[in-house]
Amino acid sequence: MNPVPVALLGGTGLSGRVLYSILSSHPTFKCVSIIGSSASEDRRFEEVWEEKEKKLEEIHQNVGYERLPFPSNSDAGCVRPMTFETFLSSHTPTSVKFVFSTISPSLGFLETRLTSIGFTVVSISPHGRLPSNTFVIEHSLSSLPLAPASLYKSPNCVVCGLTPVLSCLVSNLRPLGLEVSGLTITTMQSLTGRGDSPYDTELCVGNMLPVGQIEDTEQYITSELNGLFGFSSSMSVDVRCYRGGAARCHLIDLRVLVGGLFVEDIHVQTDDVKKWCEEYDPCKEYYDLARTVGVHTTKAENTPIHFSSNKTGMLQSSVKGMTVVVTNLAVEKKMIKMTVMVDNLMKGAAGAQEAKNQDPTPSVP
Ligand SMILES: NC(=O)c1ccc[n+]([C@@H]2O[C@H](COP(=O)([O-])OP(=O)(O)OC[C@H]3O[C@@H](n4cnc5c(N)ncnc54)[C@H](OP(=O)(O)O)[C@@H]3O)[C@@H](O)[C@H]2O)c1
């Protein structure tokens, strides 16, 4: 099979570099263009990469940032990033099948320009996210558009991590006549969530940064969860976000209030939720099909949720890849409480390309 040519808008940024690491040895895709700002234009990609990784290491050395190595197993050494205008003058929607976009929301107009001239954009940027174009593969597989669309979005990285867990709960509660009737979400997000741009430490309260002061993350999480799950407008979704404490991986305190017709009669136990998490695998058939047709996916080798009963032994830095970790689980009366951990750069960013899985034959990483 000929590799599918793709371009990476924002490919010189942190999320872009993680995605490029996957694409550089990808059996289905070939990255033919890295698009960055004029600061990276025509420089050796490796040089830009090393410079940015060195800076991140310096900024986050006290929380143990591990440098992302420049891919050695590809022709990456010859790659030179180009500006958006150069990309437009040298590529067409025929020469580039998908543009994977890891651009900041303020540059979302670049995505609009691309779709307006016929490119298909697969994006992690908050710009232009709507319930109708936003997907998390585990939850959305059955509701993906049947006809190819021009824009596929994946939600905020916290939502990428919470969605498999909530989807698991919703699908197991429903047959019991129960439902999710309230959510309280407190995040302790990684410092790498801001990519190559460091935060101003003067904004910290103690050693944590209240995200709501400077970013719209709390609103994104609320509206994107409502959009994905169709929660009723009267349901309380209460979100508070903080940053600090880890160079990679977001830690999320999740409290789910259970309601519904039979809530006084049926009492969910901690062991029930543990079993639900361990058995949850909604994409199994899809991935089995992918394997039989020889198509590669970035899906976790294991099931989407890893349940860890060890409350103290799971380091944030060991949460890497597409699997979401659930630990610290307790069910008390009508409240399910747990800690969820997600790799913000893999599951939250690079793996988001799975949002594009609308074809009967899977064709994305
Ligand atoms: N970091 C995370 O954990 C994470 C997770 C999920 C989603 N996201 C989302 O990913 C997006 C990017 O985040 P990031 O952390 O990767 O940011 P970042 O490291 O700051 O990267 C920003 C990218 O945008 C490029 N850029 C800036 N101005 C440009 C222009 N005029 N034309 C073309 N490219 C331009 C930069 O190019 P140069 O390097 O050449 O200047 C760089 O490649 C955001 O929307 C964020 O919400 C981030």
Image (spheres, rainbow, N blue to C red):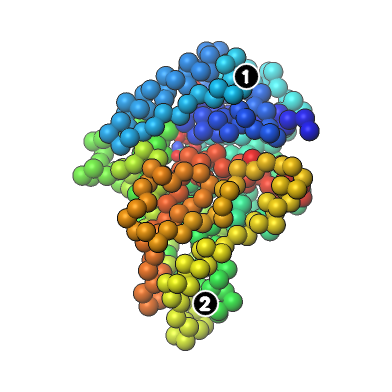
Q: For the residues carrying marks 2 and 1, which lies nearer the camera in this image?
A: 1
Residue of label 1: 75
Which disc, if any, is residue 339? none
Q: Position of residue 260 (x, y in %)?
A: 50, 79
SS of the residue under disc 2:
loop
* Looking at the image, residue 1 lies above or below residue 272: above
Q: Which residue is drawn at 59% across and 76% down?
A: 175
Q: State whether label 2 is within 8 Å of ligand 1.
A: no
* Looking at the image, residue 237 lies above or below residue 202: below
Tags 2 and 1 touching, CB below 8 Å: no
In-front residue for pair 257/172: 172
Residue of label 2: 178
* Looking at the image, residue 312 lies above or below residue 78: below
Q: Sort mark 2 into few (<14), some (14-19) or many (20+) by Cα contacts within 10 Å.
A: many
- What is the three-letter code of the residue carrying label 1? Asp
**Viewport quadrant of the C terminus:** top right
Residue 148, quarter of the rendered image: top right
Q: Where is residue 327 in the image (x, y as percent from the top left)?
A: 40, 59
Q: Residue at x 45, y 72 (%)?
A: 271
Count of residue discs? 2
In the rendered structure, the answer to whether residue 143 lies left or right of residue 101 reads: right
SS of the residue under disc 1:
loop
Q: Is residue 73 visible?
A: yes
Q: Residue at x 57, y 74 (%)?
A: 174
Q: Which residue is drawn at 37% across and 28% down?
A: 56
Residue 102, quarter of the rendered image: top right
- What is the three-letter code of the residue carrying label 2? Leu
In space, the residues marked 2 and 1 are separated at their CA atoms by 53 Å
Q: Is residue 212 visible?
A: no
Q: State whether label 1 is within 8 Å of ligand 1.
A: no
**Viewport quadrant of the N terminus:** top right
